[in-house]
Amino acid sequence: MPAMLRLTAILMTALCMLSLTAGARAATFGSNHAVVIGVDEYGGRWPSLRYAVADARRVAHFLEAQGYSVTLLLDAEATRESILGAFREAATNLGQDDRFLFYFGGHGHTDRLVGTEQGYLVPSGATGIGGMIAMEEIRNLSGLMNNVRHQLFVLNSCYGGTIGTLRGAVSLVRKERPDYLEQISQRPARQFMAAGGPDQQVLDGGPGGLSWFTHYFLEAVEDGGADLDGDGIVTFPEMQAYLLPRASNGTQTPTSGALPGHAFGEYMFDVAAAKSAQPLEEFSVAGVESAQASTAESPQLRNIAMDFDAMQQPIHALYAAWEELDLDAYAAQWSASAVQHVGGKKRGFADIIARRAKLFPRLARVEVERYQVWYRGFDEGVASFDASYDMAFYFKNGKVLRESERETYSTRKVEGRWLIVENRDYLR
């Protein structure tokens, strides 16, 4: 090919890529609105926090720079009534061309009722459960805004990570598609990111007068640390892959997922491609055993982020296999050398599958009502996750068994594919 033709082809390809990125930046959203909450002072019923208000102000500033209109409620302004009122106003005014972000910084609470964990956000003025906002209410409020195309919930609260993940949290829209950015901007998105699990107290003090989670969140989406492919757009999968390993440590393990109504869109942020996060090795959590610091050198963190979806895919596929009662799909998620621990018993791969081969034919159907996965760390090629689930097993003889449990998984790449190598079940 003559040199001039080669140059023309290169320029056309570059212009095409720029066009796709520019389209994603516009994202065809008519209006961007956010409700941002920060509560430091609880008036004695709950311990005071130091960074929730600063976090909320900083997040609001970032979102305004992104073109959002922001309803900012701080301390005494952030009552249950005002928060729910802000949701209602958004549900009334936003439509199918719009997107909505909810950020909460403050206390959370987990209550166990009839064998099931119930999570709550604690607004200003709450003195008991009745004054809190249940995660179930958050899910319902999300449903009230079902005409809003993209929704993102960012929850930076202690003991509050029980909003729940649904099957289908893993995108069906492959990044290799030439129209990937257009597809994920047009499809409905209902996604969340939570700073910690139901039994975890998230870290308050961090760099720059922010909490650790908010610091890493902004590092991901404002500084562009999560722009893994360098296109100037941070998609939710990129944010998830970067933020979860980055912000996990021995005290808190963030989680993320999807809510009812999610249809494989992806929330996204526009970042300047020239921006980048500060070098990973500059950050450490003083006095806290950091998963990334203890198990991976800083250059490895980016590799973890790039492979993060694949690491947890066998866990998502396992829950899907339960609902489909697909024994072959179930077996395909395990390594041949996998070990399962149940109580004091230890089972190998053959025993695991043999037990499922006996159980599956007895079942009429299985409902995975809710499950949630937490990243725990990465060490010597093994990724560790916690999972919490609510499942209902409907037997052909009419018996119904409901389980609300926790378990752990370890996954490893085996012959190019991530598989489960260890499972510890019934830990609750």
Image (cartoon, helix red, strand yellow):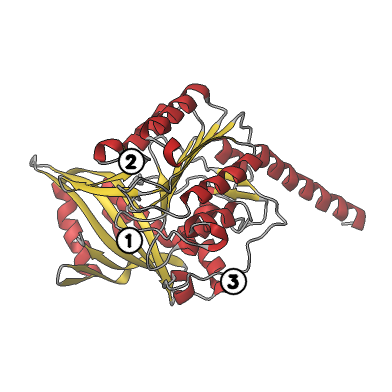
| The one of 329 and 113 positioned closer to us in this rendering | 113
Crowdedness of circle 1 by 10 Å Cα count: few (<14), some, many (20+)? Answer: some
- Residue 169 in view (yes/no): no
Residue at x 40%, y 27% (from the top left corner)? 144
201 to the left or right of 35: left
Residue where numbered disc 3 is placed:
282
Residue where numbered disc 1 is placed:
386
Question: What secondary structure is marked by label 2?
Answer: helix
Residue where numbered disc 2 is placed:
135
- Closer to the chain start, of discs 2 and 1, is 2
- Distance from label 1 to label 3 (Cα)? 28 Å
Q: Amino acid at mark 1?
A: Asp
Kindly indicate the quadrant of the structure image that contains residue 283: bottom right
Looking at the figure, which quarter contains the C terminus?
bottom left
| The one of 353 and 398 positioned closer to us in this rendering | 398
Residue at x 48%, y 69% (from the top left corner)? 285
428 to the left or right of 169: left
